[in-house]
Image: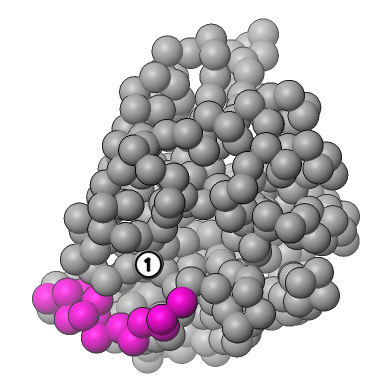
Amino acid sequence: MNESALSDERWRALLRTRATDPEAVRRAYGARRRRPNLLSGRGTVFLLAADHPARGALGVGGDPTAMADRRSLLERLLVALENPAVDGILGTPDIVEELLLLDALHDKIVIGSMNRGGLAGAEWEIDDRFTGYDARSLMDSRLDGGKMLLRLVDSDRGTVPTLQACAEAVTELAAYGLMAMVEPLPYRQDSAGRLVLRTDTASLARAVTVASGIGVTSAYTWLKLPATDDPAVLGATTLPVVVLGGAPSPDPAADLASWGRTVRHEVVRGLVVGRSLLYPPDGDVGAAVAAAAKLLEAAK
C-alpha cells in the first residue's frame, strides 16, 4: 500500500482541523465539485464501501480490528480513489467528512450510509435503526443518494421496524430526487442464534421483490445485491443493481470471477466493494482496485 497517500503533515493537518475548525466540514460539503451523472460515460458505477466501522464490523480476515485503525483506512481509501475508474464512495458521515477535509471527493459520487444501528453481533442486530444520514441531510449536504441495509429474518420481529424505516427513507429520498440504494439480504438464525446469509435462489429473489416494492415509488431505487450465478435472482427486478463485495474470501481471484459473472447481467450497473479491495491479502490496494475496474470494464 502507498502510505505516502496520507503523509504525517497531511494527517496532522486533518487532526488540527478536526479540533479547531468544525465549520470546515460544512464548508467542505459546500465546496465539493459534483459530477452531473451517477453513471460513468460507460454506463457503469464503481464505488468503494466504507461504512462498516459505524456498525462495529471491524474485522478483515484474521484481524478482528483491522478497520479500527482510521489512518490506515483513510490511506487505503485515498489510494483507491486515485484510480480514475473509481466513481466514488459509500460511507458514513465521519468518513465522508474526513475525505472531504482531505480534498479527495471532487467529481466523485458520494452515497451516504443511513442505518448503522444494527451493531454486528448485538442481540438487536436486525432492528437496524437509522443512526447516520437522513434524506434531508443528504440533500442539504449535496450528496448523491442514501444507502440502507435491509436484513430480512422471518423469525426476528426486529425486521419489522427496519422494513418500515427503509420504506420511509425510500419515499423521502425520492421526494428529493436522490438515489435510494437498498441492500436486501435474507438471513436465518442458526442453533446458536448467529445470523447466516441465505444464498438460495428463492430467498434471494424474495428479498429482491420485497425491497423493490417499499416506499411510495421505486423511481429512484437501486438494489445492492450479492454476487450470484443464478439469473433468476437478477431477473426478479427491473431496478438498477450494483454488486456488493461482501466479506473477502481467502481467494481474491475467486471473488473477482464471481463479481465478473454477475456484472454481465443486463440489470447490473456496477460494483460496490469495500474490504475485499481495501484490505487485499497482499496489501496492494492499487492493484486490487485496478483488477476490479478492469473486470467491470470488460463486462460492460
Q: Quadrant of the N terminus?
A: bottom right
The quadrant in which residue 166 appears is: top left
The residue under the point 60% across, 83% down is: 41
> Which quarter of the figure has residue 225?
top right
Q: Main secondary structure of the magenta part?
A: helix
Q: Secondary structure at mark 1?
A: loop
Percent coordinates x, y for residue 280 in the rendering: 72, 64
Which range is magenta? Answer: 23-37
Q: Is residue 204 above or below residue 106?
A: above
Nearest to the observer: residue 149 or residue 201: 201
Residue drawn at 58 percent across, 79 percent down: 40
Asked which quadrant contains residue 287, the reply is bottom right
Q: How many marks?
A: 1
Residue 136 position in % (x across, y down): 20, 55
Tell me the residue at 69%/25% (across/down): 203
Q: Which residue is mark 1?
A: 144
* Residue 101 image point, x, y percent: 30, 80
Q: Left or right: 245 with respect to 86?
A: right
- Residue 205: image location, x then y, percent: 68, 31
| Magenta segment includes 29 | yes
Examine the structure image and report whether residue 26 is included in the region drawn in magenta: yes
